[in-house]
Image (cartoon, grey):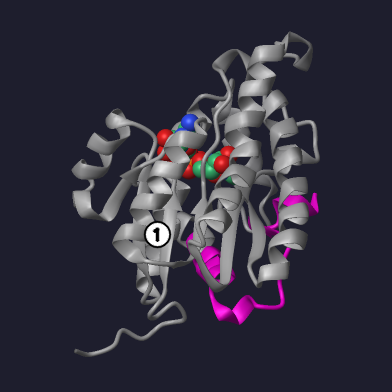
Amino acid sequence: MKKMAGILAGKKFLVMGVANKRSIAWGCAEQIKAQGGEVVYSYQNDRLEKRLLKLGLAEEEMVECDVASDESIDAAFDQVKEKFGQIDGLVHAVAFAPKNELEGSILNSSREGYLTAQNISSYSLIAVAKAAQEKELLAPKASIVTLTFIGSERAISNYNTMGIAKAALESSVRYLARDLGKTGSRVNAISAGAMKTLAVTGIGGHKDLLEQSRSLTVDGVNVSLEEVGNCCAFLLSDLSTGLTGDIIYVDKGVHLS
Ligand code: NAD
């Protein structure tokens, strides 16, 4: 059989967080495949499974994984290992905060909403890294990529609790990079420019957020899913073995302003 060329040829990856074709996870999966990599997808629950089936994915290519539950992560990773053996890395493109955490003042944040955002959007990266290591799911020189946003370091309107969760996520990237590095794995984050996805429509005044982000790009054009996906493919590949614990901006220069 003819071998597929590309920087990810012969490698397999778990992509977590596809909800539809606008999802950043979908953009990453498309570019992984374009670079010759193989993808297994994880979805949150039955509702999301139906969406993936509608996208044309087959049941054999996916596993259920609710990152709020250690049992669900365990079961999912057992299935991934059974189906694929070891994987060369994973893409964590998962986040959630209750809607009332994503509007107005941070002073409206509740303890429960704050902890939910931290749990799903930040701790989940540690939880999946831990399970992957314990189950020896990661192949030598594996690479983990997560998605963050500049609201971690600036007080962006309405982003509030999620910004704080992203700051914790970015810090988790550095600690995980240190500790997983001992077994040869790398961990990095992409800080993507704003793009209209399902998650973004949950943020109060998201149209303004998208427009403001676009206006701050160097050329007035928002970053595309393909551009974020290409950077993800690079971070998963052996071309980036010198990078770990880093936050890479893929936002067309929004972070310069
Ligand atoms: P999206 O809505 O397409 O994806 C979010 C995914 O998170 C969904 O698939 C959802 O099912 C999943 N999810 C939520 N709770 C979960 C749980 N308990 N278990 C498993 N999965 C769960 O939106 P997106 O914008 O593609 O988001 C992907 C990542 O990119 C998020 O971390 C988001 O914060 C980040 N990000 C988005 C933007 C943007 O502008 N869209 C910019 C920078 C970073």
Which of the pair 128/245 is nearer the observer? 128
The residue under label 1 is which amino acid type? Ala
For residue 236: magenta?
yes
Which percent across, then down, holds residue 162? 67, 30
Which percent across, then down, holds residue 61? 26, 55
Q: In the picture shown, does residue 231 fall above or below 17? A: below
Q: Residue at x 39, y 35 (%)?
A: 44
Which percent across, then down, holds residue 14? 42, 57
Q: Dot 1 corresponds to which residue? A: 29
Which of the pair 164/89 is nearer the observer? 89
Q: Residue at x 43, y 36 (%)?
A: 72
Res. 56 visible in picture: no
Which percent across, then down, holds residue 176? 71, 55
Q: In the picture shown, does residue 249 fall above or below 16? A: below
For residue 39: magenta?
no
Query: Range of the magenta residues?
Result: 229-257
Q: Residue at x 73, y 69 (%)?
A: 182
Q: Quadrant of residue 212?
A: top right
Res. 247 visible in picture: yes
Question: Is 201 positioned to the left or the right of 30 in the image?
Answer: right
Q: Residue at x 70, y 11 (%)?
A: 110
Q: In the picture shown, does residue 186 fall above or below 120? A: below
Q: Residues within 10 Å of mark 1 (few under 14, many from 20)?
A: many
